[in-house]
Amino acid sequence: MSVYLDNAATSFPKPDTVYQAVDHALREIGVGPGRGGYRRGLEAGRLIFRAREAVAALIGAGDSERIVFTHSATESLNLAVSGLLRPGEHVITTTMEHNSLARPLHVAEQRGVDVTWLEADGRGCIDSRQVADALRPATRLVALSHCSNVTGTIQPLAEIGAVTRGAGVFLLVDAAQSAGSLPIDVGEMSVDLLAAPGHKGLLGPQGTGFLYVAAGIELTPLMVGGTGGHSSGLDQPTVMPERLESGTLNTPGIAGLLAGIEFIESIGRATIRSAETALVDQLVTGLGTTPGVTLYGPAEPERRGSVVSFTVAGHDPSQIGFHLDRDFGISVRVGLHCAPLAHQTIGTYPAGTVRVSPGWFTTARDIDLFLQALHTIVKR
Ligand SMILES: Cc1ncc(COP(=O)(O)O)c(C=O)c1O
């Protein structure tokens, strides 16, 4: 028996069409886009274009040239932070961030950028008034996650976007835990930069990700180099997306990402969200009757994504994870989940929590098996 409940790390399994798309790109296309004026190169170019259009449609971005393919959400966040911020500028972030955003901001801080770390409440929630109160004349950016990978807390993005738009400040969103299952519309939410991985809720392979960069924002590239076209001079092209995409793209990965997004659109994002919400409800209810359990994150289902963190009095999270895996074949993530500040905020530092994250392929039976196994472990 094997039960996978770590979709917040990487979604697994993938739809069959994702495996097929990666295989097709490797076997039948072979080359990358712009690397040959012959049939295969053109096919790769068309595939990448379709994937860019699919990502743009998914997040409500009008112009797919503003979608930059990267290898991870981490790369996207690094590109946004280091490409935008200059010494003397001010950025507002929160204590709920994953190290993929917190560490680039910490490096920026060491290079002379002022960083305000807004303290979330015990459920991981940030209020848009906290953002408004922290604004300064030098504020250039507000950067935060849409949904916490520790508590599942969904932040009030549209309200925060109204504050940043009103103040003429950019909004960078880490959509690692929301892309694919929560509604995202960069226009409606006033989002200027949005980073997401391809391998979590978008159901694509690892080694894929993207950054949306709103029209009018010019980022300094993280890397310069070959872009396939515009090859005549030494200067990096100024046109998007080539300006920010150097090196051969991960065509097989992007083919898989496109298939993942097509799968999501065929099911419907609202259907995925309500299936995940039902599994989260089942988990929260079951954990509520498990002796010694403390649950973290908001109680309201509409404020919580598909992530549930808990601790059990008298049991180390890592021991629970070890026994779930060894004795029951159940995979969950334990510890700090690359977000130490979030654990300090909710009071679970340094041991962390046990995190359970259902995905589209998780069944109610998987959750039952997990709850039964947990009962057995805590009663031993
Ligand atoms: C909230 C959040 N941001 C960023 C990341 C980093 O994603 P990636 O590993 O694709 O770079 C993760 C991954 O766990 C995450 O949960």
Image (cartoon, rainbow, N blue to C red):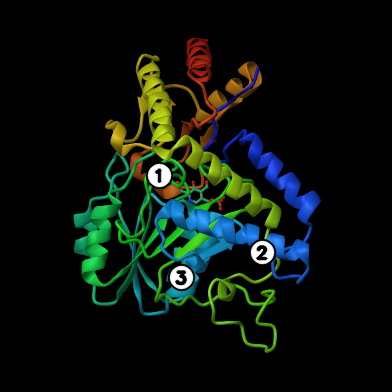
Secondary structure beneath disc 1? loop
Check residue 227 in the rendering and tell me which mark sits there, or answer none: none
The answer for how far apart the CA atoms under marks 1 and 2 are is 35 Å
Residue 53: percent from the left, percent from the top?
51, 58
- Closer to the chain start, of discs 1 and 2, is 2
Q: Residue at the spot x=42%, y=24% of the render? A: 279
Secondary structure beneath disc 2? helix
Three-letter amino acid code of the residue under disc 1: Ser
- The residue nearer to you, when weighing 269 against 290, is 269
The answer for how far apart the CA atoms under marks 3 and 2 are is 35 Å
Label 1 close to label 2 by CB (< 8 Å): no
Which residue, given by chain and number where applicable, does mark 1 sit on?
Answer: 148
- The residue nearer to you, when weighing 317 against 8, is 8
Residue that lies at the very extreme toward the front in this rendered image? 39
Three-letter amino acid code of the residue under disc 3: Ala
Residue 251 visible in rendering: yes
For label 2, being within 8 Å of ligand 1 is answered: no
Q: Dividing the picture into quarters, in which one does residue 192 lie?
A: bottom left
**Left or right: 108 as drawn, with respect to 229:** left
Q: Residue at the spot x=27%, y=59% of the render? A: 161
Crowd tier of the residue under label 1, counting other residues whose Cα lies within 10 Å: few below 14, some 14–19, many 20 or above: many
Q: Residue at the spot x=70%, y=60% of the render? A: 43
Q: Residue at the spot x=41%, y=60% of the render? A: 61
Which residue, given by chain and number where applicable, does mark 2 sit on?
Answer: 45
- The residue nearer to you, when weighing 56 against 178, is 56
Residue that lies at the very extreme toward the bottom in this rendered image? 233
Which residue, given by chain and number where applicable, does mark 3 sit on?
Answer: 108
- Closer to the chain start, of discs 3 and 2, is 2
Is residue 32 depicted above or below 119 in this figure? Answer: below
Secondary structure beneath disc 3? helix
For label 1, being within 8 Å of ligand 1 is answered: yes
